Image (cartoon, rainbow, N blue to C red):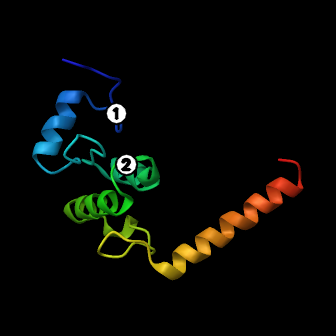
Amino acid sequence: MTVEASGPGNRSTEERQEMARKGEAMPDGAYPIGTRDELVKAIKAVGRGNAPGSTIRRHIMKRARALGATDLIPESWTSSGQLAASLLAEAVQARAAAAKTWLLTGG
């Protein structure tokens, strides 16, 4: 049995497989969400997954509903798991402005 440090985000391979079987994690065991803390971490980690972002967001939204924590879902996420276009455009502009500032100040 593979054992990692205990706590949210540090589940054993067996725990992740069981959670995947119950729909509490992605089919490969990624994004196990059994608690509100794990939900918050999953929301922050969407861009780091191997699956498409919309697939991961749909999984996270499903788990948020099951945990009664839909208030934690970002407003920019649509029910299909896509990002709302206008909010996405704003986020891209904000990142571009931050990158420009970083470059102009010498990083």
Q: Nearer the viewer, residue 19 or 82?
A: 82
50 vs 62: above or below: above
Q: Which mark is residue 37?
A: 2
Residue at the image position 25 percent from the left and 28 percent from the top: 12
Viewport quadrant of the N terminus: top left
Choose between 22 and 54: the one closer to the eye. Answer: 54
Nearer to me, 69 or 12: 12
Q: With 87 as the anchor, is 105 left or right in this view?
A: right
Label 1 CA crowd tier, 10 Å (few <14, some 14–19, many 20+): few
Q: Which label was assigned to residue 60?
A: none
Relative image position of residue 34 (x, y in whole percent): 24, 47
Lateral position of residue 104 relative to residue 71, left or right: right
Dot placed on the residue nearer the N-terminal end, 2 or 1: 1
Toward the top, the furthest residue is 1
Instruction: Tell me the SS state at disc 1.
Output: loop
Looking at the image, the residue that sits furthest to the right is 105
Distance, label 2 to label 1, CA atoms, is 10 Å
Q: Which residue, given by chain and number where applicable, does mark 1 sit on? A: 7
Q: Badge 2 local density, few (<14 within 10 Å), some, or many (20+)?
A: few
Could you tell me the amino acid type at mark 2? Asp
Q: Are marks 2 and 1 in contact (CB under 8 Å)?
A: no
- Residue 22 screen position, x and y as percent: 10, 47
Residue 78 x %, y %? 36, 76
Q: In what element is the residue under mark 2?
A: helix
The x, y position of residue 62, in whole percent, is 23, 63
Amino acid type of disc 1? Gly
Q: Nearer the viewer, residue 19 or 48?
A: 48
- Name the residue at 27% across, 44% down: 32
